[in-house]
Structure formats: C-alpha cells, structure tokens
Amino acid sequence: MPRVLVTGSAGQIGTELVPHLRSLYGKDNVVAAIHKASGGPSLRDGPLVTLDTGDSAAIDGAIREFNVDTIYHLAALLSATGENDPQLAWRVNIDGLRNVLEAARKNGVRKLFWPSSIGAFGPDAPRTNAPQNSPLNPTTMYGVTKVAGELLCNYYFVKYGLDVRILRYPGLISNVAPPGGGTTDYAVEIFYAVLQKGSYVCFLREDTVLPMMYMPDALKATVMLMEAEPKKAPRHLGYNLAAISFSAGELAAEIRTHIPGFTVTYSPDQRQKIADSWPMSIDDSEARRDWGWKHDYDLQRMVADMLAKLRPRLTSEGKGV
Ligand SMILES: NC(=O)c1ccc[n+]([C@@H]2O[C@H](COP(=O)([O-])OP(=O)(O)OC[C@H]3O[C@@H](n4cnc5c(N)ncnc54)[C@H](O)[C@@H]3O)[C@@H](O)[C@H]2O)c1
C-alpha cells in the first residue's frame, strides 16, 4: 500500500479525495495535511497534520514521521482569489510547490500528484477542443503559476526521476465541500441558491461556456492516472482532462427540468474576464488513449445527482425551499 500525504486536504477536492484514498488504501495510510485550523470532520478518522507549505521543515517532518512515499499536493490559491492577491498566489502556488518537490526529492518520495488547470490556457489557445499541445500563455497569475508549476514538476522528473503526474482539471462541481475561490464556482453556488432561495445571481454571462467535471469523475481520473503503469503515463507535463462543457444558461435550463420556476439573473463581475481567457472545451484524447480515461457524468446525470444529494441535506438542515 502507498503511504500518502495530501496537502490542502480541507479544500474542495481534498475533502473528498482524502476519504476516497482512505477507502482504497486504508485510513492509516493516508495523512491529511491541513492549513491552520481548517478541516472538516471527514478528515478526522485518520492521521491529520497541520502544515503550511511555506514551511519546508514541516513538510520534511510530516514525510518522515509518516513514512510517506506518495504526495497529492493540493494546497493552492485558486484563480479568482489569486487575481486578488497575485503575490500570495505565486508564494503559495510556486514557492509551496517547490518546497514540496524538494522535500519529496530529499526524503525519497516516489510519486507526486499535482493538479494543473484549464487556467493554464490563455486567450491564444483554440477556444474549442483546445489540444494537448496548445500554446500556454495565460493572462492570470493563477495560470502563470500552473504553467510554471507544470514545467517545475517536469524538471523534477527529468533531473531527479521523481514520478510526478499532472492533470489539467476543468472546473469541478461537488455536493460535499464548497469551492475555494475559482471562476467556475457559480456552477456549485447555483444549486444551493436555487434550493435555498429559489433564485440566483450568476457572476458570469449566460452564454459563458467552460469545461466542467463532476467530482466523482475527478476522483476517478486522479486515481487512474496515479495507478497507471509508468509506460501508460509517459507525460509529466499536464494531461488535458475533460468531461462536459456547458454555458451558465444551459446549466440553469437543465436544473429547471427538475425545479421549474426559479429565476437566474446574470451580473458578470471581474471573473468574466478570467472565464473569457479560457477555452470552452478541451481535447483530452491523449489521456483517453494513454491510460484509458473515460468520464461517467454528462450534464443531465450530474444535475440529477447534485439535486438528489443536496435536496435532502438542505431540507433536513431546515435550509431548503
Ligand atoms: N476545484 C476546482 O475546480 C479546480 C479546478 C482546476 C484545478 N484545481 C486545482 O486543484 C487544487 C486543489 O483545489 P481545491 O479546489 O481543492 O482548492 P481549495 O481552495 O478548495 O483548497 C485549497 C486548500 O489549500 C490550503 N492552503 C492554502 N494555502 C496554504 C498553505 N500556504 N499551506 C498549506 N495549505 C494551504 C487551503 O487552506 C485550502 O484548504 C489546486 O491546485 C487547484 O488549482 C481545482
């Protein structure tokens, strides 16, 4: 069994990835690292450490204490938060990544997972089906850190043989943890707003199409890539990863087939500019060819499952309409 450390465990992905990895590898083999006092109850049934990825000694200490051989490095600032404080985004996303890669190298860690993003693309990438080898010239600090991070990870593979594996996640939709300050957060917020208030004010335009994915597919892709034989995952820069692309208006229309009559108004803010700099869809045929990637959730299935999971929870909490 791998001995795993997950940084950024209390975030949108970590909240679900940690229990998922614990179910696969045993709860004592997956250490959840949280920042400061963050972290929900779902992380507390196995080893838990508090560490700042700016603190190299703390990362070294956690790897040694728990005999870690595999790291999922999720700690980061997301696109919208990163645009509000670009200097902090660089420190957390790049200095933090370098600290984790160095600690991994020095302590004999074998494998490292790091998420890149559709934010790695910029306005000069093809808007539809952006290919694996598109130009990567992002115009956000988040995107800059994703491109630099991919190169840095690949450097550790080439120079030191650290088996780093990278997915360019699309916007992720989850019914468990709230999103952490990204440009695709609207696609989660809308479900809560519709169920709790019967209306939603969307911060993107109605016709904004972005690549998206339901969290169960993201967990599946992450584990598939990490468990693939090395010869099946030869790419140590980011693999494009895709499932569904839809506009904000199309998402609202699909929710309306289950809950008629709610209102959505569109009031684009500064996140529209970020969304407009990203492709609307991604070509992930290399991931499908190399390690057999295939998504399970289309728009209809994702919406039905989100509502089936959220409705009873929000109603039992007395928050539903
Ligand atoms: N969620 C998405 O839609 C999405 C899409 C593409 C890529 N990604 C990438 O996946 C990764 C995880 O994303 P997420 O949505 O879970 O993010 P999130 O914002 O929900 O969680 C990030 C976590 O990092 C922690 N953190 C921040 N600064 C830290 C520091 N200095 N030291 C230690 N921990 C720190 C935060 O406390 C938070 O719990 C990020 O690299 C993100 O760029 C996410």
Image: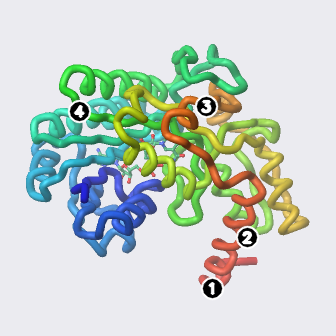
Q: Are marks 4 and 1 in contact (CB under 8 Å)?
A: no
The residue where tag 1 is placed is 316
Q: Which residue is nearer to you in this view: 215 or 196?
A: 215
The residue that label 3 is drawn on is 285
Task: Give the labeled residue for mark 2.
Answer: 195
The N terminus lies in quadrant: bottom left
Instruction: Indicate the amino acid at tag 1.
Output: Ser
Q: Secondary structure at mark 1?
A: helix
Q: Residues under labels 4 and 1: Cα distance?
A: 47 Å
Q: Can residue 201 be seen?
A: yes
**321, 219: nearer the viewer:** 219
Judging depth in this view, the residue of 319 and 288 nearest the camera is: 288
Q: CA distance from mark 2 to mark 3?
A: 36 Å
Amino acid type indicated by mark 3 = Ser
Question: Between disc 1 and disc 2, whose residue precedes?
Answer: 2
The answer to which of marks 2 and 4 sits earlier in the sequence is 4
Which residue is pictured at 69% across the width and 66% down the height? 305
Please name which of the two marks, 3 or 4, marks the residue nearer to the observer.
Answer: 3
Q: CA distance from mark 2 to mark 4?
A: 46 Å
Whether the residues at callouts 2 and 4 have beta carbons within 8 Å, the answer is no
